[in-house]
Amino acid sequence: MRLAPVVLAVACASLVAGCAREPTAAQAPSPEAQTPNTDASQLRSILRTESDKAGTQAVVFGMWVGEKEILTEALGSTTPGVPATTAMHYRIGGITETFLSTVLLVLSERGLVDMEAKISRWFPNLLAADQVTVRMLAGNTAGYPDYVHKQAWVDRLLKDPFVAFTDDELIAFAIADGKMDYAPPGSSQAYSHTEYVLLGQIMQRATGKSMKELYDTYVLGPAGLKDTRFPEGTSIQPPVLHAYMNDRGTHEDSTGWTPSWALSYGGLTSTVPDLGRWGPIFGKGKLVSAASHQEITGPRSVGKNKNRADLYFAYGFVFANGWYVQNPDFNGYAGAFAYNPTNDVTLVAVTTKPEKPVTDPAALPILRAMVKYVTPSTPLNF
């Protein structure tokens, strides 16, 4: 049985860690500018073909060049007999990490969080906290085990998918055996939900603000993203794209399942059009300084684990052959988000699944096919 929530924003990071080739350079290559292919009829045909191939229940897709909408399209149904629409809200999972890293660097610029500070300042009794910096958490180079790979956590979630986890409980699941994944901290890189839990806690403790206040104040308000919210409770603002899971042995509506296991860094709800607006805001670093944007997107992880110059994990997303990519799979929502800074293209997709999906998760294959058409000289390389 595959627990789909385990791959919230992990799929790309895991693939980076599992690449066969070793890193070969310290600086990412600069892809040559190419005029993107933008024929809406071709995009629509690819979307329908890939959706049918994957066996999705619903798919919502959008493409933009800068702020210009090329296509937004919804296929399938949100619930039986109710068509999906492009206005529907859903949990965006690990795409939230692009918002999180933006907030973090804004706080750093304002002197509220020191990226080089040891996290023992906030977690004096935590394993290895006197060796781990805030910057390591942001880049997932600290070495804390990921609680989603702990069987005790999996069993707890499957027993009660509505359970309200606290951050302390999640951290405890991660370090129950008292061991780090690698040492010393900073010597390697591996995606870890635990490190984002710690980062969210540090941001809140350093500022005295909740995650909702941090997102609203430093990102959502300034960006004007009115359809993107940090949820209170398990509800999603209407209209809602419903999600479904098979992980407990039956096909069931998982829309209201707890987001608490990934709330601070994965819990935002949004729409495909709002994420289309977010693409160039994030991708061009419009809310942060040039230095901070380089901090977020740069190749700091190259040379660690299997990260290489054309495929590496940055601050909450993967740099893949010139694209900034996130592909979360969260409580039944499979998502894909990609921005290409060379030609200012944003691609966004979300899929839900029927009782017997052919491909699960389905959003990433759709994204791959779209990128191959839009920028054929720089396809996704994972």
Image (spheres, rainbow, N blue to C red):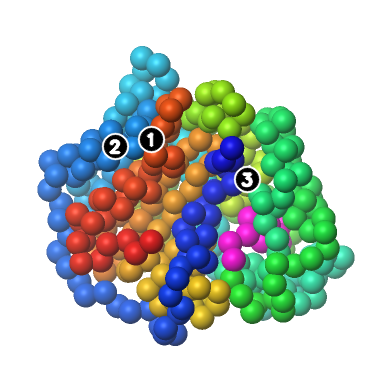
Which of these two is toward me, 24 or 21? 21
Residue drawn where x is 39% and y is 39% of the image = 359
Q: Which amino acid does label 3 sit on?
A: Leu
Query: What separation in Å lies between label 3 and label 2 (alpha carbons)?
Result: 32 Å
Label 1 vs 2, first from the N-terminus: 2
Q: Position of residue 314 (x, y in %)?
A: 49, 68
Q: Is mark 1 on a helix, strand or loop?
A: loop
Which of these two is toward me, 272 or 368? 368
Image quadrant in which you'd find residue 27: bottom left
Q: Is residue 177 left or right of residue 257?
A: right
Whether residue 99 can be seen here: no
Whether residue 362 is in magenta: the answer is no
Q: In this view, does 133 lie above or below 44?
A: below
Q: What element carries label 2?
A: helix
Q: Is mark 3 on a helix, strand or loop?
A: helix
Q: What residue type is labelled 1?
A: Val
Mark 3 = which residue? 263
Residue drawn where x is 40% and y is 58% of the image = 325
Q: Position of residue 159 (x, y in %)?
A: 72, 30
Magenta-highlighted residues:
190-204
Mark 2 = which residue? 53
Asked if disc 3 and disc 2 are in contact, CB closer than 8 Å, the reply is: no
Q: Between label 3 and label 2, give the one nearer the viewer.
A: 2
